[in-house]
Every structure is written in C-alpha cells, then in structure tokens.
Image (cartoon, rainbow, N blue to C red):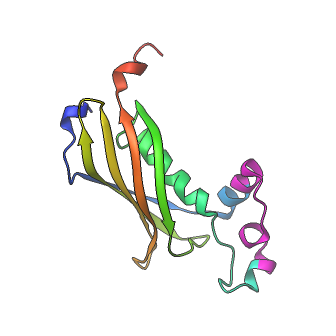
Amino acid sequence: MKFEEFSIGQEHHETHLVTQEEINAFAQVSGDKNPIHIDPVFAGKSIFGRPIAHGMFGLSLISAVLGMSFPGFGTIYMGQEAKFLKPILIGETVDIRLTVKNLEPEKKRLLITTRIFKENCDLAIEGEARVQYNPDLFVSL
C-alpha cells in the first residue's frame, strides 16, 4: 500500500489464538516468568482461575499486525499508549482491531487506534499507536 491510500476511519482486524506455548516462549524471551502466566496450578488459585497472557504480549500482537499487515512492511513503530482493561486468557482467540485516527502526510505518519477484544467482545486492551509508514525506505534491503 502507498501512504496516500490510507484514510481516516479505515479499519483493519485480525484474529489470534493465544496458546500456552506462546506465553511460555514470551516469558523466556522477556524474562517475565511470573507464575500467573506460566504455572497453571498457581494461576488456578488466582482470581483468574487459570494462566493469563502478559499485557506486553497483547501489545506484541498489535506490533505484529502493524509491522506485517497494516500498514505493513515499511512501518516504523514510534510509540504506543495503552490501557489494560481485562486479562487475555490462554486459549482465547482475540480480535486485534486497528483504526486510522489521524494522518500526517508530510511526515508519512499515522495515528492508529489499537484495540484487542476478547472472545466475549469485552475490550482487553485499548490505546493509540503512532507509526511512520514509508515502504520505499526499505526497497534496497
């Protein structure tokens, strides 16, 4: 896509099944091995009743969509504001929804509303991402 093809209000969404294997790998890479994420016995005694995904794992799903799909290749992730509203449970399929909120054509930047919805349609994470999008910068790579 070219920057000029984006419009305010444009939406994109993808779904993702959150697995314990992913959460275990994320814990290993991030160093956040809190048992609420990786120990089913410990997490079973919590208010959640089972392991939950790291909040930053949820943001990594947003990052993946930004870099790979929308806007996609050529995206530079410049910032993210986020509120964690509900836990994402292991085994849930979440819906990652992005909406273009503002465009800065002179700098090729987009302000994108970022939301992750749980299977029951509860909002788990909401925020805004600022990205620069210029796939021409990466043509020679």
Q: Quadrant of residue 2?
A: top left
Whole-percent x, y for residue 43 in the image: 74, 78
| Residue 34 among magenta residues | yes
Judge whether 17 appears above or below 138 on screen. Answer: below
Q: Position of residue 53 (x, y in %)?
A: 63, 66
Number of marks: 0
Q: Is residue 12 left or right of residue 48?
A: left
Tell which of 22 and 123 is nearer to you: 123
- Which residue is pictured at 19% across the width and 36% down the height? 5
Predominant secondary structure, magenta span? helix
Tell whether 62 sits left or right of 113: right
**Image quadrant in which you'd find residue 97:** bottom left
Q: Position of residue 36 (x, y in %)?
A: 74, 73
Q: Is residue 60 left or right of residue 32?
A: left
The percent position of residue 102, horizontal first and vertical second, equals 25, 48
Q: Is residue 104 above or below residue 127?
A: above
| Viewport quadrant of the N terminus | top left
Q: Residue at x 53, y 71 (%)?
A: 92
When the figure is inspected, residue 141 is found, relative to residue 23, above or below; the finding is above
Instruction: Look at the image and give the residue range highlighted in magenta.
Output: 25-42
> What residue sits 42% from the left and 20% below the top?
138
Looking at the image, the residue that sits furthest to the top is 140
Using the rendered view, name the quadrant where residue 134 is placed. top left
Question: 63 or 112: nearer the eye?
Answer: 112
